[in-house]
Image (cartoon, grey):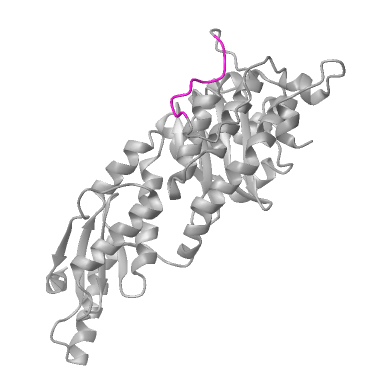
């Protein structure tokens, strides 16, 4: 009998620890392969308690019918868990590009200071999630998470749960639960609930985000302050080569795409979205251009001039690829402005 079968049935004559933990109280077992109902209410009752069995069934149904949300999949996964598990306060942590730390891609109910501090070094998080099951941080263990919260939040959240999501034994994300009826359940129930959803969630995280972003390793997004020096070098190289056209520079705005993505991802942290978009754009243009960050939602591409590179086609191609990777639609192309490289001589 598979895990899902054991989760969705039990023997009343000889209830197993699993059946006792889940305390199934009836309800339909979903098997309809149709379209998921995104407006499904959380599994619970009028007192705000969670029915673990109903929550598992609803999560399994939605996870297995989940459409591909591309690189922002962790945010959509968090919204799904937020709804079904009634997470009033929490976050989903994913690895930064450097892989040195995990930081929140989507949050709910956390203060600004906590959202800034909740950047857990990878070795620390892997140690906390060493056993790959649900982790309850309370009592003396509560202190292990204190440095990553504001003083007000850490005192408010006296019991915190971590639910790690793995794929091929690699930690891809961790759900941080600070406020939810789920925290009233025991360790066995949390472990079973996590086991029910982790395989599908891990696959979605790997296939939709981890794999597409693997190409961004080693590609840099530079600070805008380095742009004048780069443009001066490109101008000097063009002069030595006797090029008449000179280097190319253009400023691109991501505002329309950011708005489209945020409309579908209510819990998404804008700072993380900005990093993902800029990293992806840097990969897409790395063969010809260097990318310079300019604020949260715009960038400048700078590189040697090339007669076969058409700015309209370049920006159109970047915009189309971003729409595919981030699963968002644009009614118009991304706006851009051609810059005069000579203006940077005096900078």
Q: Is residue 38 magenta?
A: yes
- Residue 65 is situated, as x and y percent measured from the top left of the image, at 53, 38
Classify residue 138 by image quadrant.
Answer: top right
Relative height, residue 254 to residue 19 (above, below): below
Q: Is residue 119 magenta?
A: no
Q: Position of residue 324 (x, y in %)?
A: 37, 54
Q: Residue at x 79, y 35 (%)?
A: 1
Residue pictured at 19% horizontal, 66% vertical: 312
User: Is residue 336 left or right of 50 when viewed as pictured?
Assistant: left
Q: Dividing the picture into quarters, in which one does residue 259 lie?
A: top left
Is 309 displayed left or right of 141 in the figure? left
Q: Is residue 245 toward the left or the right of residue 190 in the image?
A: left
Q: Which residues are magenta?
A: 37-45
Residue 341, compared with residue 325, is above or below; it is: below
Q: Give the x, y percent position of residue 8.
A: 70, 26
Q: Nearer the viewer, residue 15 or 158?
A: 15
* Residue 207 % position (x, y): 54, 53
């Amino acid at each position: 009998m598979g895990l899902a079968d054991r989760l969705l049935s039990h023997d009343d004559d000889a209830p197993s620890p699993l059946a006792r933990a889940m305390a199934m109280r009836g309800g339909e077992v979903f098997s309809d392969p149709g379209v998921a109902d995104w407006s499904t209410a959380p599994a619970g009752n009028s007192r705000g308690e969670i029915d673990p069995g109903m929550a598992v069934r609803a999560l399994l149904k939605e996870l297995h019918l989940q459409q591909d949300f591309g690189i922002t999949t962790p945010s959509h996964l968090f919204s799904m868990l937020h709804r079904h598990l009634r997470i009033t306060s929490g976050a989903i942590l994913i690895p930064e590009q450097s892989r040195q730390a995990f930081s929140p891609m989507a949050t709910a109910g956390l203060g600004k200071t906590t959202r800034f501090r909740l950047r857990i070094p990878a070795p620390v998080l892997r140690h906390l999630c060493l056993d790959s099951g649900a982790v309850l941080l309370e009592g003396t263990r509560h202190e292990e998470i204190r440095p990553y919260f504001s003083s007000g939040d850490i005192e408010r959240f006296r019991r915190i749960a971590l639910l790690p999501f793995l794929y091929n034994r690699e930690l891809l994300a961790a759900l941080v639960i600070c406020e939810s009826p789920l925290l009233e359940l025991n360790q066995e129930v949390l472990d079973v609930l996590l086991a029910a959803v982790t395989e599908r969630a891990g696959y979605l995280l790997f296939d939709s985000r981890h794999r597409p972003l693997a190409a961004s390793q080693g590609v840099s997004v530079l600070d805008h302050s380095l742009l004048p020096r780069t443009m001066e070098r490109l101008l000097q190289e063009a002069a030595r080569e006797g090029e008449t056209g000179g280097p190319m520079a253009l400023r691109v705005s991501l505002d329309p795409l950011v708005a489209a993505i945020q409309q579908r991802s209510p819990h998404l942290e804008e700072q993380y979205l900005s990093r993902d978009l800029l990293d992806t754009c840097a990969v897409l243009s790395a063969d010809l251009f260097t990318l310079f960050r300019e604020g949260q939602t715009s960038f400048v591409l700078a590189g040697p001039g090339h007669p076969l590179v058409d700015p309209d086609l370049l920006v159109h191609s970047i915009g189309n690829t971003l729409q595919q990777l981030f699963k968002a639609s644009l009614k118009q192309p991304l706006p851009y402005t051609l810059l005069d490289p000579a203006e940077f001589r005096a900078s």
